[in-house]
């Protein structure tokens, strides 16, 4: 039995699921949801542990210095992963190109030895581009307005929010500060209603 859930629903498949797999069975959906729940729980646990480490070992640092350590390490790590993945992609493309050229030469030699004047159609299927869609380790191609919008989101969410959260962790008890931070999704309900017209 096949169960295809809408992409816009809460438990729907990822946006590129239809392009890759065409359909989603109940078994595949349950597996995907279980993995998602486990990763979400792991994310919460690691987040809480990160606040504990910050509270315990970050007393000599300001909130901006803590942000620099966190975001700087994340930026360096993401840059390193991107370089490694691009290098692997380049090696795979070169290997694919060499194999296809060898196959074309061998097919041409075989057809010539048979006295067939027509060339094989293998050259028409040779493509050296990347796979469909942008790879996850590449920067997306967007317009300037989209980049400005994303940059504003990065400024508020990735920069100011952790800075204020770190400041609150040192001013309040750890449990109380983390509890207040965890109610953030509740404020998205009225914002989504006012800005996008989504009724909760």
Image (spheres, rainbow, N blue to C red):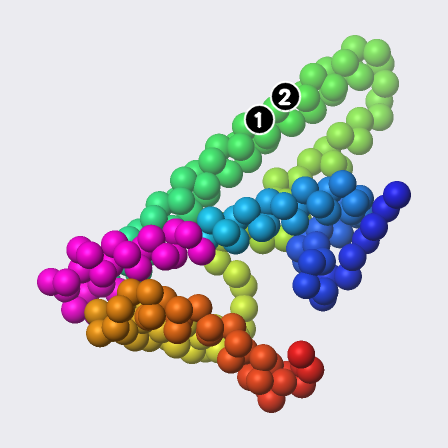
Q: Please, is residue 139 above or below residue 100 in the view?
A: below
Furthest residue to the right? 1
Q: Residue at x 25, y 54 (%)?
A: 53
- Image position, residue 40 (x, y; %): 52, 53
On-image quarter of the N terminus: top right
Q: Residues within 10 Å of mark 2 (few under 14, many from 20)?
A: few
- Image position, residue 76 (x, y; %): 31, 51
Q: Residue at x 60, y 45 (%)?
A: 35
Real-space Cα separation, disc 2 to disc 1, in angstroms? 6 Å
89 vs 124, left or right, is left
User: Can I make out residue 151 in this image?
Assistant: no
143 vs 9, left or right, is left
Q: Main secondary structure of the magenta part?
A: helix
User: Can I make out residue 106 in this image?
Assistant: yes
On-image quarter of the C terminus: bottom right
In this picture, which residue range is highlighted in magenta? 44-67
Between 176 and 87, the residue placed more toward the observer is: 176
Q: Residue at x 65, y 49 (%)?
A: 33
Q: Which residue is mark 1?
A: 98
Residue 165 drawn in magenta: no
42 vs 23, left or right, is left
Whether label 2 touches label 1, CB < 8 Å = yes
Q: Which residue is mark 2?
A: 102
């Amino acid at each position: 039995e096949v169960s295809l859930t809408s992409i816009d629903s809460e438990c729907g498949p990822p946006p590129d699921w239809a392009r890759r797999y065409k359909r989603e069975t109940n078994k595949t959906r349950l597996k995907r949801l279980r993995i998602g729940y486990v990763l979400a729980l792991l994310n919460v646990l690691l987040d809480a542990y990160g606040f504990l480490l910050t509270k315990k070992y970050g007393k000599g640092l300001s909130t901006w210095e803590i942000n620099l350590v966190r975001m700087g390490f994340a930026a360096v790590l993401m840059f390193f992963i991107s370089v490694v993945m691009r290098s692997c992609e380049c090696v795979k493309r070169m290997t694919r190109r060499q194999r296809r050229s060898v196959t074309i030469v061998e097919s041409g030699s075989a057809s010539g030895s048979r006295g067939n004047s027509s060339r094989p159609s293998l050259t028409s299927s040779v493509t050296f581009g990347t796979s469909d869609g942008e790879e996850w380790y590449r920067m997306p191609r967007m317009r300037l307005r989209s980049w400005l919008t994303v940059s504003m989101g990065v400024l508020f969410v990735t920069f100011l929010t952790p800075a204020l959260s770190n400041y609150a962790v040192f001013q309040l008890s750890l449990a109380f500060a983390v509890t207040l931070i965890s109610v953030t999704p509740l404020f998205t309900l009225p914002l989504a209603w006012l800005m996008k017209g989504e009724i909760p």
